[in-house]
Image (cartoon, rainbow, N blue to C red):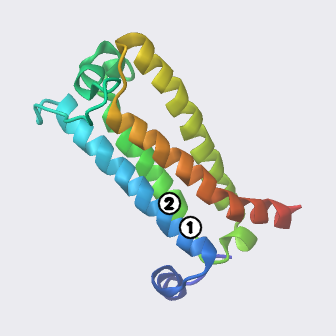
């Protein structure tokens, strides 16, 4: 049973238990992921002319994000899809009340599965990125780290949800 909206509002804004602290980190990281996707989207759609990179030879975000690789899915610049996926992750991290692992275990399980899918997808895409461009996108690789951190942060609540459901 879902908590009433007033209680949910109070819990999300004021409670400080470990699950909510981790969930806030996951929301924050996911929103950084959406911001990264937005910046790259602006470049891929011609609204930004440059994507600065750290001074490391393996990074050439402009080449990667202007290549065939970046436009090969759904006839859409791939960073637009990135904003959607990180927005969904943020929504899953934010969904449910403080006791969602016990009352609605499907939500934390879905979050962990989504984060694991993102990590696997990001690793596959990094291989493609390198294979097709002999370079990596610094923005994309930062997003990969965000997905890995999200997966790690999601595990304690999901393990408790799974244990409680059995």
Q: Residue at x 31, y 20 (%)?
A: 71
Tell me the quarter of the picture where residue 133 sits.
Answer: top left
Instruction: Determine contact: label 1, label 2, CB under 8 Å.
Output: yes
Q: Position of residue 164 (x, y in %)?
A: 83, 67
Tell me the quarter of the picture where residue 29 sits.
Answer: bottom left
Query: Residue placed farthest to the right in the image?
Result: 166
- Foreground of the two, 4 or 113: 113
Q: Residue at x 27, y 37 (%)?
A: 54
How many marks overall? 2
Q: Residue at x 38, y 39 (%)?
A: 82
Q: Quadrant of the C terminus?
A: bottom right
Residue designated by label 1:
22
Q: Position of residue 16 (x, y in %)?
A: 55, 83
Q: Residue at x 35, y 49 (%)?
A: 34
Q: Position of residue 6 (x, y in %)?
A: 49, 88
Can the viewer see residue 30 in this picture?
Answer: yes
Can the viewer see residue 81 in this picture?
Answer: no
Vertical placement of 26 versus 126: above or below? below
Residue designated by label 2:
26
Q: Is residue 159 left or right of residue 138?
A: right
Secondary element at tag 1: helix
Mark 1 to mark 2 CA distance (whole Å)? 6 Å
Secondary element at tag 2: helix
For disc 2, the neighbor class at 10 Å (few under 14, some 14 to 19, many from 20) is many
Q: Is residue 133 left or right of residue 131?
A: left
């Amino acid at each position: 049973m879902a908590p009433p909206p007033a209680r949910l509002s109070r819990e999300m804004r004021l409670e400080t238990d470990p699950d909510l602290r981790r969930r806030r980190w996951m929301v924050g990281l996911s929103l950084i992921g959406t911001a990264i996707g937005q910046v790259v989207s602006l470049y891929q759609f011609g609204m930004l002319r440059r994507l600065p990179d750290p001074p490391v030879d393996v990074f050439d975000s402009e080449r990667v994000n202007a290549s065939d690789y970046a436009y090969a899915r759904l006839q859409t610049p791939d960073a637009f899809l990135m904003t959607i996926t990180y927005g969904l992750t943020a929504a899953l991290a934010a969904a449910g009340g403080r006791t969602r692992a016990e009352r609605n275990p499907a939500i934390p399980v879905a979050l962990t599965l989504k984060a694991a899918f993102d990590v696997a997808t990001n690793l596959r895409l990094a291989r493609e990125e390198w294979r097709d461009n002999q370079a990596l996108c610094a923005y994309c690789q930062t997003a990969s780290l965000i997905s890995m951190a999200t997966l790690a942060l999601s595990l304690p609540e999901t393990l408790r949800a799974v244990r409680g459901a059995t």
